Amino acid sequence: MRTLGLDVGTKTVGVAVSDGLGLTAQAVTTIRRTNLKADLAALAELAREHEASRVVVGLPLNMDGSEGPRAEASRKFAEVVSQALGLPVEFWDERLSTVAAERTLLEADLTRAKRRQVIDQVAAQFILQGWLDARRSQSDVHADDFDLDPHEM
């Protein structure tokens, strides 16, 4: 079961996908937005190609955690994506994901032009990886959760 991660912007949608085990996210592509029908068709093709069972959309919250116009637009886009693809959509706080992506690309010594080409998909990768990590940490079970003495095991 793979998950698509989306970094939704007004001009582009960065796309990432998880591996089959839900451990890692990989950047896939950047969709140049033209119109809603074409955007949804491109996302539907990617969902089919990668056998996605869910979509995680980055939610651009303000630094104080409140939602502004961009968060509202992302929620509306996510609702349409969910209906069009027939997949559940979840949200992940994307604050600073683009900053982290930019820093990573700078450390990789990519040219400004190359960074511009991949920044959105790398931001989607950061969004999806954050969601995957949080989901995994919630499902981890530890011996100390059961008040077990490790010496008695």
Image (cartoon, rainbow, N blue to C red):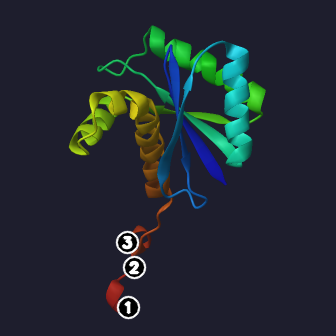
Q: What element carries label 3?
A: helix
Marks 3 and 2, Cα distance to the nearest angstrom?
6 Å
| Labels 2 & 1 near each other (Cβ < 8 A) | yes
State the mark number for residue 148. Answer: 2
Q: What element carries label 2?
A: loop
Q: Nearer the viewer, residue 121 or 109?
A: 109
Give the mark nearest the N terminus, 1 or 3.
Answer: 3
Q: Which residue lies furthest to the bottom in this view?
A: 152
Place residue 39 in its image quadrant.
top right
Q: Please name the amino acid that badge 3 sits on.
A: Asp
Category of crowding for the residue at label 3, using alpha-carbon neighbours closer than 10 angstroms: few (below 14), some (14–19), many (at least 20): few
| Labels 3 & 2 near each other (Cβ < 8 A) | yes
Residue 149, above or below 54: below
Category of crowding for the residue at label 1, using alpha-carbon neighbours closer than 10 angstroms: few (below 14), some (14–19), many (at least 20): few
Q: Mark 3 points at which residue?
A: 144
Residue sitting at 62 percent across and 16 percent down? 76
Residue sitting at 22 percent across and 43 percent down? 107
Residue 93, position as x, y percentages in the image: 42, 31
Q: What element carries label 1?
A: helix
State the mark number for residue 152. Answer: 1
Residue 145, position as x, y percentages in the image: 42, 67
On-image quarter of the C terminus? bottom left
Q: Which of 26 and 142 is in front in this view?
A: 26
Residue 8, above or below 124: above
Residue sitting at 47 percent across and 67 percent down? 141
Q: Which of 141 and 53 is in front in this view?
A: 53
Q: Please name the amino acid that badge 2 sits on.
A: Leu
Residue 32, position as x, y percentages in the image: 55, 21
Residue 125, above or below 59: below
